[in-house]
Image (cartoon, rainbow, N blue to C red):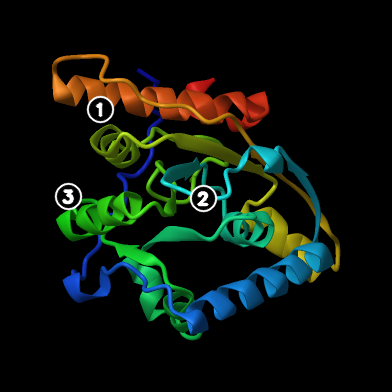
Amino acid sequence: MPETPDLPAKPVSQRIRPSLTRLPTRTPARRAFRKLMRWILRVLVVCFTRPTVQGIERIPRGGPLLVVTNHLGDADLVLGVAYSPVDAEIVAKSELYDFPVLGWLMDAYGVIWVHRGQPDRAAIRVILQALKEGRVVALAPEGRESLTGALEEGLNGASFLALKSGVPLLPIAFTGTQNAILYRNMRRLRKTAVTMTVGELFHLEQSSEDKRQAIKLGTDEIMRRLAELLPEEYRGVYS
């Protein structure tokens, strides 16, 4: 069990809109839009950062697959979409839907909106359906952008989904993508060194007859796998 620093509680969505949570349909228009966005984001990454991407060859070209990442800042999503060779369904907090332009772009891209801080059964059903259909789903087990610039304690959602579905997991770790660093350098016309590191596929085992205990052990394993991909200063409570 990691030692948790004295941080504010994880966020709780104040506005619940079940109608937002749906599985994106893979229409020809959406496929084309996603491909266009990947190229646009790749250009932005090259313009504003010095990216180092490692282990891309470890990403399967299809699902079912659950991708788990750390979450340092806005650029995590940009970097991941820009360089991933696979079309993934991204789990995103519902609050972003209300952001001008960004919310529209994300909805057009087709994300799975989730309400945080509670058992979002609608989101769970949608994600399990996506995995059942053989899709790739990406989410951040920490449940929010890190307040410390390093790993915070993971939530149990990813572990529950992996154990329930039996699909493999793929850890992807980011460094250098903290908003404070990235946006400061952008204002100064400096490029920020960022990294994206892809780990090895793994499965979670039902290691305990107690389901809650098994889920908790699974969460610790997921976060340990992410920590192994990160430099010591980014490992946080999983150092």
Q: Say few, some or many: other residues with alpha carbon within 10 Å of mark 1 (under 14 / 14 to 19 / 20 or more).
A: many
**Label ID, residue 117:** none
- Along the line of sight, the residue nearer the viewer: 44 or 235: 44
Q: Amino acid at mark 2?
A: Gly
Horizontal placement of 128 versus 186: left or right?
left
Task: Determine the CA span between mark 3 and mark 1.
Answer: 14 Å
Task: Determine the CA span between mark 3 and mark 2.
Answer: 28 Å
Task: Determine the CA span between mark 2 and mark 1.
Answer: 25 Å
Residue 103 placement: quadrant:
bottom left
- Say which of marks 3 and 2 sits in front: 2
List the residue tagged with mark 3.
119
Residue 91 placement: quadrant:
bottom left
- Expressed as whole percent of the image width and height from the top left, the position of residue 100 reads 46, 85
- At horizontal 13% and vertical 18% (from top left) the residue drawn is 210
Tell me which numbered mark, 3 or 1, is placed earlier along the sequence: 3
List the residue tagged with mark 1.
215
- Say which of marks 3 and 1 sits in front: 1
Horizontal placement of 175 versus 115: left or right?
right
The quadrant the C terminus occupies is top right
Mark 1 secondary-structure assignment:
helix
Residue 66 placement: quadrant:
top left
List the residue tagged with mark 2.
62
Q: Say few, some or many: other residues with alpha carbon within 10 Å of mark 2 (under 14 / 14 to 19 / 20 or more).
A: few
- At horizontal 59% and vertical 23% (from top left) the residue drawn is 228
Vertical side of 1 occupied by 51: above or below: below
Q: Say few, some or many: other residues with alpha carbon within 10 Å of mark 3 (under 14 / 14 to 19 / 20 or more).
A: few
Tell me which numbered mark, 2 or 1, is placed earlier along the sequence: 2
- Along the line of sight, the residue nearer the viewer: 82 or 147: 82
